[in-house]
Image (spheres, rainbow, N blue to C red):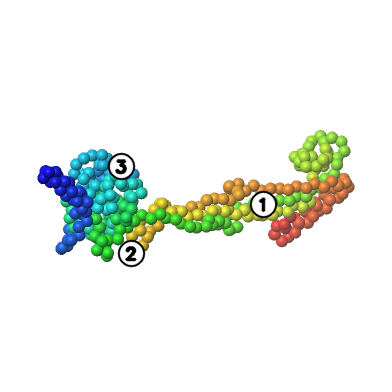
Amino acid sequence: MKYALFIGALMAASSCFAQDKDPLYNFNKTGDPKVVKTLGTNPEFPCLQNKRTPEEVLSAMRKVDRTEGRQKQKMDNLLMGAGFESGISDVRLSNISMVTLPDGTTGNMGGCGYNSSYTQLKGNENGYRAWKITSDNGSSVYFMAKCGNSFAMNSMDTKNNVACTQMPVTITSEPKVISQSAASVKERVETKESYVYYHKKGKNKHVTDEERMAMNETSDSHPSQPLLLRSVKKAKFVPQDYRVTVTPQADNVTVCNNKPVDVAANINVEYTSEYTGNYPNSTNKTYKKVSKHVYKKSMRKMRRAERKEQKVSRMTGIQVNK
């Protein structure tokens, strides 16, 4: 009977010991913290060193959970102290996040041999990356990303101990279309030409290119040489349109207390103009059928006008517009 009572008391004492928080959470410290400038020289959990994703961290923890010994017991105690009732087995992927502890953070850090000491992270102005394991009750424990050492932040040191965290980035911007001015884009010329012709009797022995074009544009099978009466050119400037949007370079950004947030963004310029560098000129030709008498008379008057224009140009030295 006495032996049974002794065994029962021993089991109860062991249960109470397991439920006590790990010494990492004891902040009854006096004196200045030990300054730690370099991580990785005294790893506590080598299996957690240099992990890149929460998935890798959880996988390493699961491997420890399948073992026996001091490493599993220590990790279980640390996690139970942070609110995970069964230790490692209660940790889910959603409980793990990457944070950055700012330079100057104080707290208890674990080390090789599963001891802990009151330390201050000092010497890296960019901070110290750590995996934050947060339970459903809001309590947390950290594991330093570089060395795998456990870390409990001193909640009393409100000046230094505000962890930087990763927050999603969303840039809201309306796409803007920018058109280049007429002076910087290519010119497109539209020409309208008016011709007269008469129907030639008999078959043409020698058909010129102009006569062949008139045949294609009219229903006349034997048109004369077309006579150009009017040519109007109209220049159009075709603008080049660009669609400009702004997007973040990364999905997340590091946010720290009392520090400006740097958000790197990409300015995307997309060419959306109707044309792609080929701006062809166009010519619209119209043909009017007249009598041979009107055609010949018009031709004589046109030639007479051309001779007068040439005479004016010679007298003034100025080219007359045609």
Q: Identity of the amino acid at label 1?
A: Val
Give the residue furthest to the left: 2
Direction from residue 238 to residue 157 in the image, left or right: left
Q: Find disc 3 in the rendering and name its residue.
A: 59
Q: CA distance from mark 2 to mark 3?
A: 35 Å
Q: Identity of the amino acid at label 2?
A: Asn
Q: Residue 238's spot in the image, x, y percent?
A: 62, 53
Q: CA distance from mark 2 to mark 1?
A: 61 Å
Q: Is residue 109 visible?
A: no
Q: Residue at x 12, y 43 (%)?
A: 1
Q: Residue 79's spot in the image, x, y percent?
A: 26, 50
Q: Residue at x 53, y 56 (%)?
A: 175
**In this rendering, which labeled residue sits more in front, label 1 or label 3?**
3
Q: Find disc 2 in the rendering and name its residue.
A: 258
Q: Nearer the viewer, residue 55 or 80?
A: 80
Q: Nearer the viewer, residue 38 or 151?
A: 151
Reading the chain from its start, which is encountered first: label 2 or label 3? 3
Q: Find disc 1 in the rendering and name its residue.
A: 189
Q: Nearer the viewer, residue 203 or 118?
A: 118
Q: What secondary structure is found at the residue carrying circle 3?
A: helix
